[in-house]
Amino acid sequence: MSDDARPETRCPVPHGDRRRTAPPGERGTPRVEVLDGVWHVRSLPLVRQVLREADGTVQAGFSAETAQQGLTGDHPPVLYADGPEHRRQRSATARFFTPATVRRRYRDLMEERADELVERIRQDGGTELSAITLRYSVEVAAQVVGLTNSDIDGMSRRLERFFSGPVTGSAGSGGAPRRLAGRVGAVLGSLRPLWAMNAFRLKDVRPAIRARREQPQEDVVSHLLAEGYSDREILVECVTYAAAGMATTREFISVAAWHLFEDARLREEYLAADEPARHGILHEILRLEPVVGHLYRRTTRDLVLADGAERHEVPAGALLDLYVRQANTDPQELGEDARQMCPERSRPRGIRPEVMSFGDGAHRCPGGFLAVQETDIFLQRLLRLPLEFAHPPRVSWVELIAAYEVRDVVLRVGAGQGWRTPSPASTAR
């Protein structure tokens, strides 16, 4: 896109920069490059094009190609499926995630649980936020999926063990003993998810299946049983929804709180705003801090990627690494100040406020509205407490889902701050 043709995208009122949620050493340029046969795509138009090439690419992220080798049955997991079967599955479950359904079925639950958890934080004088956000996101997602026949706290612990896979952080140094320890740790780490998966199956998924065979509900597990899914196939789908609805939403709530607690002006704007404006602020935070930083596709035919005057011919069978974080801050599309937060930022036509943070095309996350709604409901309450960070949170990188983890989010009562009560505008639905 030429400078003359590009719409004005600069931020009228900048708020601040993104947090350090990228893995160490991640490159921001060039817009397209090929390294060891892998196409690295950082351009917003090209990331969007690839994600919309439903007939020219297949899912290659989230260990798809490895996982599918061990999957059997008549129903491929929705995360890994492509083509007509994937479209059918998505159409059949879309009703569980519409804004109308979220408001009708889950909003009261979100408000009740948020009230309980924030009151606990108030009484305790602070909290480690990532533990609270895990409990909250698990309980909400469990209602949607249908995992309501087991202990929520226990399920939260089991899922955390499963998703706390290999992480990258500050690199260490050492000789042969350290390398040996690393290999032993990798082997032991690979066993932990298997143990956690089995515990999740026995204590959470199986009781839910048994209960819904006797009395179906309006949830995903009941739908899968009606479709003839086996217990094993339902387990795989429950893990998929757990990753999307529990693990990633938990991280987003923490990183959004991080921004809003550290930026007093933005926090006041958020608390004084109506719901659409609050959601706009959360979408902008998500644009800067996409929880899943990379998406992967493999081409099933030759593709031509066109980015302005540049054309890239991608052969069939090529692996494409799509850089969500770089696409979301593409200066050619979103302005030279795209790394700064600005809820009022204008965008190219057809680009959503969160840009590529929920993906695009056939595999776009269906639970985007649910995630933003539950985040908003929780933060409205949390941000009225006189809290501050005890120290900067710790960020690490989870290779399994190419996502960041925010931990040690320690909040404590701040000196000289008073309690605030909600205003009518901020609590309006």
Image: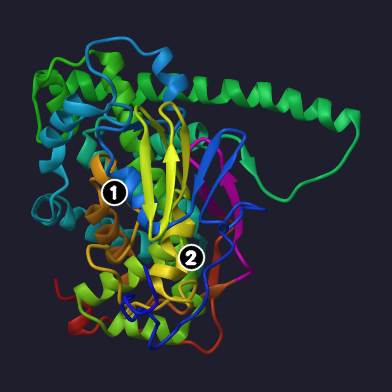
**Residue at 22% in and 41% down:** 143
Q: Does residue 419 appear in this view?
A: no
**Circle 1 sits in a helix, a strand or a loop, which is it?**
loop
Identify residue type, mark 2.
Asp
Answer whether residue 404 is magenta in the image: yes
| Image spot of residue 196 (x, y percent) | 48, 25
Identify residue type, mark 1.
Asp
What residue span does the magenta drawing correspond to? 390-406
Foreground pick, 253 / 333: 333
| Image spot of residue 61 (x, y percent) | 43, 34
**Residue at 17% in and 46% down:** 97
Q: Does residue 15 appear in this view?
A: yes
In-image side of 119 versus 369 (left or right): right
In the rendered image, the quadrant that contains the N terminus is bottom left
Q: Which mark is residue 360?
A: 1
Foreground pick, 254 / 318: 318
Q: Earlier along the polypeptide chain: callout 1 or callout 2?
A: 2
The local crowd at label 2, few if under 14, some if 14 to 19, many if 20 or more residues have their Cα within 10 Å, is few
In-image side of 162 versus 53 (left or right): right
Q: In which quadrant of the rendered view does residue 151 lie?
A: top left
Say which residue label 2 marks: 124
Q: Which tag is nearer the camera, tag 1 or tag 2?
A: 1
Answer whether residue 70 is magenta in the image: no
**Residue at 38% in and 88% down:** 12
State whether residue 134 is above or below residue 80: below
| Image spot of residue 89 (x, y percent) | 17, 29
Q: In which quadrant of the rendered view does residue 270 lie?
A: bottom left
Q: Which mark is residue 255?
A: none
